[in-house]
Image (cartoon, rainbow, N blue to C red):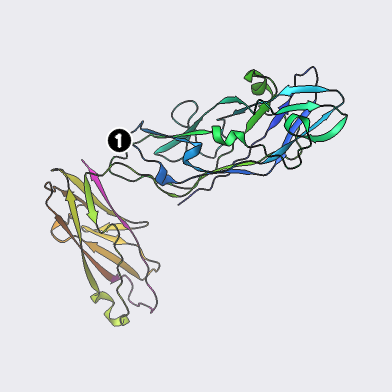
Amino acid sequence: MYIRLSVCMLITIFSFPVNAYLYGVEGNMGHIQINPEQLVFKTGKAGDSVTLAASSFDATPFTGHWVTTSNATSEQNLYMRYYTTFVSSLPSGTSDGWFKLTDAVEFSSISVDFPVTSQRKLMLTSEGERTVGYNGSPATATAFIPWVSMIILKFRLTKDAIDTPTYIPAIDLFDYMAVYSSGDSSDAERLAFLNTISSPVQFRFSVTPGFISVPDPMCKVYPNQLDIDFGVFPVSKINEQVIQKTLQMTCNKNTSLKMIISGAGGTIDNGLYVLKTNRDDVVVQVKTDHLADPQGYVHGLTPVKDIPFAIPLSFDIKSIKSGVEPGDIVSNGWIVFSYE
């Protein structure tokens, strides 16, 4: 499953209230792309965090130009602040400034106040709306990009993921940034949401779907995915189809684990796990031979360090109605190993 993220930012530029000029920035959408493979946590335990600077992720800078309406001559040094105030469909994170991405991962960013550039000043010398750029020159194609290189993003685990890759879906976030003409960020705080721009700048922050990296697990299982193909057979042979598979587990120390077989809509029947299929006349049963537990499909495993541990699995098809129609059968599930 993945959640797409889009970010919408309002950007306002303003002078001191006594002047009451309207300053605005217009331009194209900026974009930051985070690949979950970049999130390599050192310990994989709750509280572990990863910090990404702009140089470590793909970014398409926002490009735009200044637009101002004024009837007086003025010169302003411009400053910018990147805010970590997000609006999301997910609850907030475990502490202030952190926002929940998944049940195991939260996100924050480091706000940085910095001048746009020392030589970039907003100089107003004529009445009416016009575009200004470096030192007041026309800026129809002047890029406004410095904030991209200053953004610092942080990701933090809220649950232990020592041996379990944690899946991050795509995410929807909304953010904003303020540009202001005073070095005092309190002005930006007070007027950050002042809606005086007819076409607000949009900024998109996205995390692509995928698994974050965790330290090498204590145990590894091969293969990490089973593809079972029963092939083509007559309807009359529906209850005679059986396929055997074996998983190989190797651990770097003696340990105890629990193995659970599961699937969407599946059930447990006398120690067998029954996977639901795309039909109402056929199911797929999963057995584990000597590991079978008639009380439920949870099995205890005790691998020995560096000695391969075989986990036999048996898959068979069973009809649950007297009449079975020809056609495709599709089913899926998963096997989860957890440490005691």
Magenta span: chief secondary structure: loop
Q: Nearer the viewer, residue 246 or 61?
A: 61
**Would residue 296 be found to the left or right of residue 232 on screen?**
left
- 117 w.r.t. 90: above or below: above
- 64 w.r.t. 250: above or below: above
Residue at x 28% of width, y 57% of height: 224
Graded by Cα atoms within 10 Å as few (under 14), some (14 to 19) or many (20 or more), the crowding at tag 1 reads: some
Q: Which residues are magenta?
A: 318-340
Q: Position of residue 5 (x, y in %)?
A: 55, 45
Q: How many marks?
A: 1
**Would residue 147 be found to the left or right of residue 96 on screen?**
right
**Would residue 18 be found to the left or right of residue 238 on screen?**
right
Q: Which residue is mark 1?
A: 43
Q: Nearer the viewer, residue 31 or 323?
A: 31
* Amino acid, disc 1: Thr
Residue at x 26% of width, y 64% of height: 285
Q: Position of residue 20 (x, y in %)?
A: 80, 22
Residue at x 35% of width, y 62% of height: 332
Residue at x 77% of width, y 19% of height: 17
- 233 w.r.t. 173: above or below: below
- In the rendered image, which quarter is residue 142 located in? top right
Q: Position of residue 210 (x, y in %)?
A: 42, 50
- In the rendered image, which quarter is residue 48 located in? top left
Q: Is residue 94 magenta?
A: no
Q: Is residue 334 magenta?
A: yes
Residue 192 visible within the image: no
